[in-house]
Structure formats: C-alpha cells, structure tokens
Amino acid sequence: MKIFKRATLTGQPSDMVEETCAIHLRFSAKNGLKSLVCFIALVVIALYIRDSFIRPTFGDVLVVVWLYYFLASLFSMPVNWLVSLVVLIAFAVELGQLLQVVAWLGIEPSSPLAVILGATFDWKDLLAYSIGGLLCCWMEKQ
C-alpha cells in the first residue's frame, strides 16, 4: 500500500494530509458476474437491436458499466479512480474515432478491432459515457 502526502489548500508543510493509494490485483467473482451480464447484454444489443436509441445511446452507457465491472473484477481501487479511468478510456476511444485512428493504422473496417473501436465520432457519445460513469458511482454507493 502506497502512502503519500499532499498539501491542503493552505499549502503549508504543517498542513500536509496523509492519503492511502491502494491498487491491488485480485479477482472479484461478484464484479466478474456483473461484467459477464453486461457483456451478454451488449452482445444481444449489437446482434439483434436496430434502433436509434438502445443500440447507440444505451449501448454506450452500458459499455462504460461493463468496462467498470470488468476492471473492478481484476483490480481493487477506489471507485472514483476506477470510474474516472473507465470514462477516460471511453473518451479516448471516441477521440480515436474523431481522428480516424482505425484508418491511420490500416485496420480493416470489417475487422473485430475496427468494430470495437468504432468509426463515427458523436458528441452525444461523450454524454452517454459520462452518464455511464455516474451510473457506476451511483450503483456502487447503493
């Protein structure tokens, strides 16, 4: 467990606060099961749902929840850190869509990797990812 000190708002050395930063590798069956359920739902949505809300919007919210529980099944770390990491990953993938990273890397558009990374940037996806992150925080506090 790593312990570090950070300054409070006053910035005075005497006002330093000790915090614990603990990230551990471990397996959580509970979070693994939640991840599996989310993954199955994502596959069903991808294969069978063709609409303008569930697949593009709810799917983006759910992918953040899935990634959160997948990583939470492998790592023990503070909820806010993990949620922030997952949302940043989702934002990075969306930025990759804006920059056409799939084309730059020469990835075949029909390949599974290209499907996972996506092809079309949409600002609404960033909102959906943020909602997914907030949903994870809310579910963890319940």
Image (tube, rainbow, N blue to C red):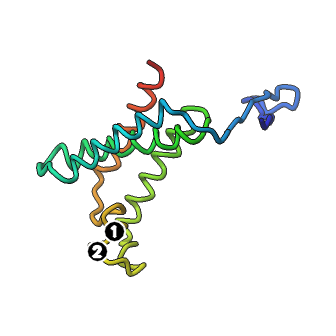
Disc 2 secondary structure class: loop
Query: Residue shown at 40%/79% (left/top)?
Result: 104
Q: Residue furthest left?
A: 51
Q: Say left or right for 70 vs 111.
A: right
Can you tell which quarter of the image residue 78 is in? Answer: top right
Disc 1 secondary structure class: helix
**Image height of 114 relative to 75, above or below:** below
Which residue occupies the foreground of this view, 13 or 27? 27
Query: Residue shown at 41%/39% (left/top)?
Result: 35
Query: Residue shown at 40%/61% (left/top)?
Result: 95
Task: Tell me where residue 22 appears, x and y as whole percent.
Answer: 70, 35
- The residue that label 2 is drawn on is 109
Q: Amino acid at mark 1?
A: Ala
The N terminus lies in which quarter of the figure?
Answer: top right
- The residue that label 1 is drawn on is 114
Figure disc tally: 2
Q: Amino acid at mark 2?
A: Pro
